[in-house]
Image (cartoon, grey):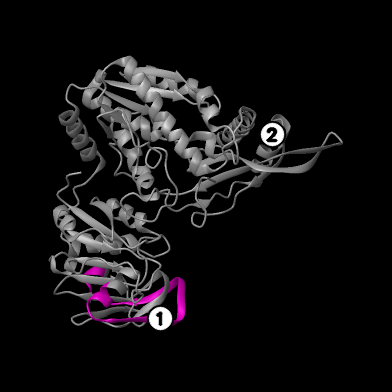
């Protein structure tokens, strides 16, 4: 993406790297995450207005610790080091980092020098999230202390001559008071950004770029009916009109009644060529006996592409395949930056050979909430834009273990009841994601004075602003009780319902 202003985030396997990127974008400045191994030549090409070093789990003095090019400090570009990033800056510029006698973890009061540009508008004390076992013992030459805690004498530092700043705490997380203000101060007061990046300009620029790229050629959109692929379809449709064909693959892994709903929405609300492919038997045949979630993703990803290839041949010459890949998919799949968490069917699941000229992913640089904003900018209806998130592999990764049609039907019915009761309680917009999981656990139960040995359904509901971190939702007990009662009474082969009360991290939102 061509942006005049870019804050480049260099990732050292930081737990919150994506949150840093989100906070920068909330300040209307575009951000991009790159791995620490990125060459200085590529960094120069990107021409960033500022650079942020993320945190990370390593110790800077260890032999195998991740390090970036020392040339970064000679670019004349402001640098902000966060946690490990501050320690790395210290280590590389001649200061001293050592193991702390006492680890600091949790919200800690930091005494700060509010005359620093980084802390403009702050009081002398601020509650911040600390998470470190090492600390900066001696500052590099040219730096001064601008923050401390009772256990960490150098909690923040600055070199105003070179515009280098370091903070031992994490401003990107909600636990740090006014954390986004710290990032904003760095972006505006130190990097001199003007903040011109917004969703409307993204949509306009993307549509223009797609027009220039595709021209009068034809494209296929991998349409699942979810938010991401729907917005991708709208962007491409705005650029090339009827030269876009949306292929909706009904793989049998969608939620109850969803295939019919998807077809109705897109045939009535989009001026595109819409093709529905019934491939349920094909997908279930390929997935038979497969329990490993990564293998499921690979199989589904490859079958998606094969279906599109076949449909493309029926349509005629098609040069481009459009997918709704978004930034978290890319990062979590370990492509470009960060450690691999899990593969996504539209990132890590693609086969080596694809019978298209090129794959276009117009949303590849956006987070989920940004995708929704683009959807509204494009005039998509709210009910579609705010539809419940659904993974590309569908219910295949919400059925733990091997997949059968019977298991899918159990899950579809249980999930439908859960979503219906959440909507009845008017919590459907308050909870960011909620769904049922068919566990691979059977347990003993009693129904009608008879012993049963049936499946356990797990319910999952989370509250999140960015889907990078999430808290489990405190759904009122009476609603959970009603959902549980309905599921065990209305869905055959289920005799137990449990509720997942784990946040992200340590868990992911999906179970697989």
Q: Please name the residue shown 68% across and 38% down the image.
A: 482
Quarter of the image where the N terminus is located: top left
Q: Position of residue 193 (x, y in %)?
A: 17, 56
Mark 2 surroundings: few (<14), some (14-19) or many (≥20) residues within 10 A: some
Circle 1 residues within 10 Å: few <14, some 14–19, many ≥20: some
Q: Residue at x 36, y 18 (%)?
A: 274
Earlier in the chain: of badge 2 and badge 1, it is: 1
Residue 426 appears in the figure:
yes
Q: Position of residue 422 (x, y in %)?
A: 57, 37
What whole-number distance in Å separates the C-alpha atoms at marks 2 and 1?
A: 55 Å
- Whether residue 298 is in magenta: the answer is no
Residue closest to the eye, 237 or 284: 284
Residue 504: where, in percent of width, then height?
49, 54
Q: Considering depth in this image, is 130 or 72 the residue closer to the camera?
A: 72
Image coordinates of residue 20 in percent, x first then y, are: 33, 57
Q: Which residue is mark 1?
A: 99
- Give the residue furthest to the front: 353
Residue depicted at x 58% and y 50%: 474
In contact (CB < 8 Å): disc 2 and disc 1:
no
Question: What number is the disc on residue 486?
Answer: 2
Residues in magenta, as a range: 89-118
Q: In screen coordinates, is 140 left or right of 313? A: left
- Looking at the image, which residue is at 23% across and 52% down? 29
């Amino acid at each position: 993406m061509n942006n005049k202003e870019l804050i480049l985030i260099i990732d050292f396997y930081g737990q919150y790297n994506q949150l840093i990127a989100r906070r920068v974008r909330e300040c209307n400045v575009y951000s991009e995450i790159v791995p620490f191994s990125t060459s200085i030549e590529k960094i120069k090409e990107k021409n960033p207005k500022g650079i942020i070093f993320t945190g990370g789990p390593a110790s800077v003095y260890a032999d195998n610790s991740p390090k970036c090019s020392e040339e970064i400090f000679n670019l004349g570009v402001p640098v902000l080091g966060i946690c490990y990033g501050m320690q790395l800056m210290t280590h590389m510029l001649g200061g001293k980092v050592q193991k702390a006698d006492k680890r600091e973890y949790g919200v800690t009061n930091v005494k700060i020098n509010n005359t620093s540009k980084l802390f403009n508008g702050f009081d002398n004390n601020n509650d911040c999230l600390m998470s470190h076992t090492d600390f900066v013992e001696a500052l590099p030459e040219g730096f001064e202390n601008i923050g401390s805690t009772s256990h960490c004498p150098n909690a923040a530092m600055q070199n105003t001559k070179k515009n280098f700043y370091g903070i031992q705490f994490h401003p990107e997380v909600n636990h740090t008071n006014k954390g986004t203000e710290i990032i904003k101060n760095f972006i505006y007061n130190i990097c001199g950004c003007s903040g011109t990046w917004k969703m409307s300009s993204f949509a306009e620029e993307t549509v223009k770029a797609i027009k220039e790229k595709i021209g009068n050629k034809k494209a296929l959109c991998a349409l699942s009916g979810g938010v991401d692929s729907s917005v991708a379809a709208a962007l491409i449709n705005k650029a090339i009109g009827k030269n876009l064909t949306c292929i909706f693959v009904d793989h049998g892994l969608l939620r109850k009644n969803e295939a019919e709903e998807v077809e109705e929405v897109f045939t009535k609300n989009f001026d595109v060529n819409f093709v529905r492919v019934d491939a349920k038997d094909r997908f279930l045949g390929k997935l038979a006996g497969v329990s490993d979630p990564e293998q499921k993703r690979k199989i589904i990803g490859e079958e998606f592409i094969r279906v599109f290839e076949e449909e493309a041949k029926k349509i005629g010459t098609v040069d481009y395949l459009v997918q709704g890949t978004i930034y978290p998919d890319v990062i979590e799949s370990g492509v470009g930056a960060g450690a691999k968490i899990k593969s996504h069917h539209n990132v890590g699941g693609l086969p080596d050979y694809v019978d298209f000229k090129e794959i276009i992913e117009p949303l590849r640089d956006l987070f989920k909430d940004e995708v929704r904003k683009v959807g509204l900018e494009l005039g998509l209806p709210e009910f579609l834009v705010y539809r419940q998130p659904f993974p590309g592999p569908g219910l295949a990764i919400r059925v733990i273990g091997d997949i059968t049609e019977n298991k899918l039907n159990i899950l579809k019915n249980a999930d439908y009841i859960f979503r219906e009761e959440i909507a009845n309680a008017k919590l459907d917009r308050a909870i960011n994601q909620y769904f049922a999981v068919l566990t691979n656990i059977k347990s003993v139960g009693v129904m009608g004075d008879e012993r049963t040995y049936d499946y356990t359904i797990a319910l999952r509901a989370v509250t999140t602003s960015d889907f990078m971190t999430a808290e489990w939702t405190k759904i009122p007990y009476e609603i959970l009780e009603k959902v549980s009662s309905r599921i065990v009474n209305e869905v055959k082969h289920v005799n137990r319902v449990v509720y997942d009360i784990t946040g992200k991290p340590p868990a992911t939102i999906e179970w697989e």
